[in-house]
Amino acid sequence: RLTAGVPGDGRDARPVEVSGLLLRGRATPTPRQLAEVGEVGIDAGRVREVTAVEFLHTVRDEGYDVVVLALVGGGVQAMLHGLAALGLERRPVVVTGYVGVVYEKLADGLLLRHGADIVLANSAHDAERFRAVYEGVGADASAVTEAALPFLGGAPYAPEEGRDTVVFAAQPSVPASRADRTYLLRRLVEHARLHPRREVLLKLRSKPGEHTTHIEELPYQKLAQKLPGGLPPNFRLVYGHMGEVLDRTDLLVTVSSTAALESLHRRIPTAVLTDLGVREPLGNHHFVGSGLLTSWDRLDGGYRPRPDGEWLAGQGVAADGSYSAAYDSARATVAELLAGGRLPALAPYYTPTTAPGYLPGILARHHLAPDGTPLPGAAAPQEPGRVRGAVRETVRNAARGAYRHGVQRVAPVIRRMGEL
């Protein structure tokens, strides 16, 4: 909520009140995960967890100027239809984006985000691809706005005498199989044994039971417990903010994590593994032409890839120092929309007419009808009293724990049984 004026030109101070709402679901961050990103300006203690209907009622009642939908594609689409159904006399500017290395579900993810006033693209390369998808289906592509990856930062890489740290950036769902994940873990441990004076870190996205956008059915923590021979003393599992880990990194290794782009932005030596092939399901095909593709065998022997400058320039990495201006266009667009009077109605590409076999299911997962209005019974009244509220929260946490147990323990067993 902007408490004075509009953002954009920087000619005078414009106080901004930032609120945070967590949409309840399988990827809802835990308090620990929220604490890791506390520097974004939102006090984790003031962030509320809400249902989709509660979110829509809050937007209706609080009068926000700008709403940023930082959700998976289905969540964005549901909230766009829900916001449109509110029929607000003065609706907020709606901003979303497709963040990170966009190597899968390009069309699906983008079309689920269509309808927002601004769809942020991570780079010139992504902006071109995003517009091509929208124009290719006959949808308005004017919302696509070139920016950069939103989480880049930190000091440029500076080697320190006596420090030699290799970090492997793990991913929740890449690779997916136990054999492939065990292979990568074994090679990382072997690298630590080959170089006993080198600190080797396995950077994990989440602890067991926590979720990110992607579900992790085979956490490296559990695989490490079963690794023959144990772990060498110079090998550690680490959590925390990626930027803080990169502060002490001398080589970043990954299969296809967005952490590679963070590392490249800071000019840290970076390697993308080819050990499991260069394949679309792994996402490392995104790095073809980058100069970063290599194998553990070469890294064990001391090889350090050198990134291709032309490839970097098109990826939103902004290693040339231009990152501070990367969001100028987005800021100007927000200011223009806020100053332009009443905004037109939100008009996503998917409607009950264009996607009658797809859209209703997406909306129903968030307890919304095909027209974006709450389904009967979805808007439960607030329960009075702290005791009833505490009971409700306890039941909710237990249900979430049961769901995560089912995803991480029961579902993989059922799938394996089905493959017999």
Image (tube, grey):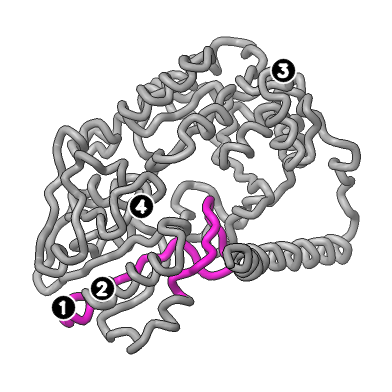
Residue in the picture at 45% in, 63% down: 177
Evaluate if marks 4 and 1 touch, with contact meaning CB atoms under 8 Å apart. no
> In the depicted view, which residue is nearer to us: 360 or 37?
360
Q: In the rendered structure, which disc, 4 or 3, sits on the residue that comes first in sequence?
A: 4
Residue of label 1 = 195
Query: Residue 200 shows which numbered tag?
Result: 2
> Which x, y percent locates residue 325?
30, 29
Query: Residue 257 shows which numbered tag?
Result: 4
Q: In the rendered structure, which disc, 2 or 4, sits on the residue that comes first in sequence?
A: 2
Q: Is residue 237 above or below residue 388?
A: below
Residue of label 3 = 353
Q: Which residues are magenta?
A: 192-221
The amino acid on which the numbered mark 3 sits, given as a three-letter code, is: Thr
Sort mark 2 into few (<14), some (14-19) or many (20+) by Cα contacts within 10 Å. Answer: many
Evaluate if marks 2 and 3 touch, with contact meaning CB atoms under 8 Å apart. no
> In the depicted view, which residue is nearer to us: 189 or 366?
189
* Of the two numbered discs 1 and 3 in the rendering, the one whose residue sits closer to the viewer: 3
